[in-house]
Image (tube, rainbow, N blue to C red):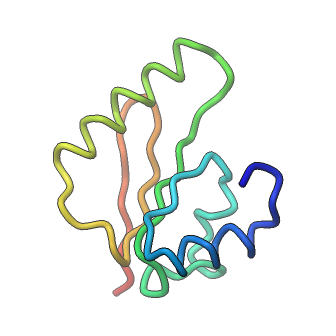
Amino acid sequence: MAGAPDAEVYQTALGKEAVLVTTDRGFGDVRSYPPSSHHGIIVLNVSPDPGQVRAVHRTLTMMLQTETSFAGTLFIVDGKKYRKRKQP
């Protein structure tokens, strides 16, 4: 859905009950996309640098091996760590 409006991407993910994986940092705004309203969002904080892409991929792989639940959670993944935020 590259180039599609954010609202369309979000609605498609909701309709498919899918975890949304994106590099669009706008999806990290919990005011616009409250964690309680979706099945999970993973924002990859990555630049075009190949070394940084590999580092983010390693962090994402570790996260996917560690986390078991994605619904209602926002994950921000970078080359060194990941953070998660659930709706209180």
Q: Position of residue 5 (x, y in %)?
A: 82, 66
- The residue that appears at 30% across and 35% down in the rendered structure is 61
Query: Outermost residue toward the top?
Result: 51
- In the picture, measured across the screen, residue 16 lies left or right of residue 3, that is left
**Looking at the rendering, in which quadrant would you find the C terminus?**
bottom left
Q: Quadrant of residue 19?
A: bottom left
Residue 6 image offset from top left, x and y in percent: 75, 67
Residue 1: % across, % down: 71, 55
Picture residue at 59% right of the left edge, 78% below the top? 33
In percent of width and height, residue 79 lies at: 44, 29
Q: Number of callouts in the render?
A: 0
Tell me which residue sits at (55%, 71%) in the image.
13
Tell whether 53 sits left or right of 24: left
Above or below residue 12? Residue 77 is above
Say if 70 sits above or below 75 in the image: below
- Residue 47 falls left or right of residue 85: right
Q: Quadrant of residue 12?
A: bottom right
Q: Up-down: is 55 above or below 67?
A: above
Q: Residue at x 69, y 61 (%)?
A: 26
Task: Tell whether 13 sits left or right of 8.
Answer: left
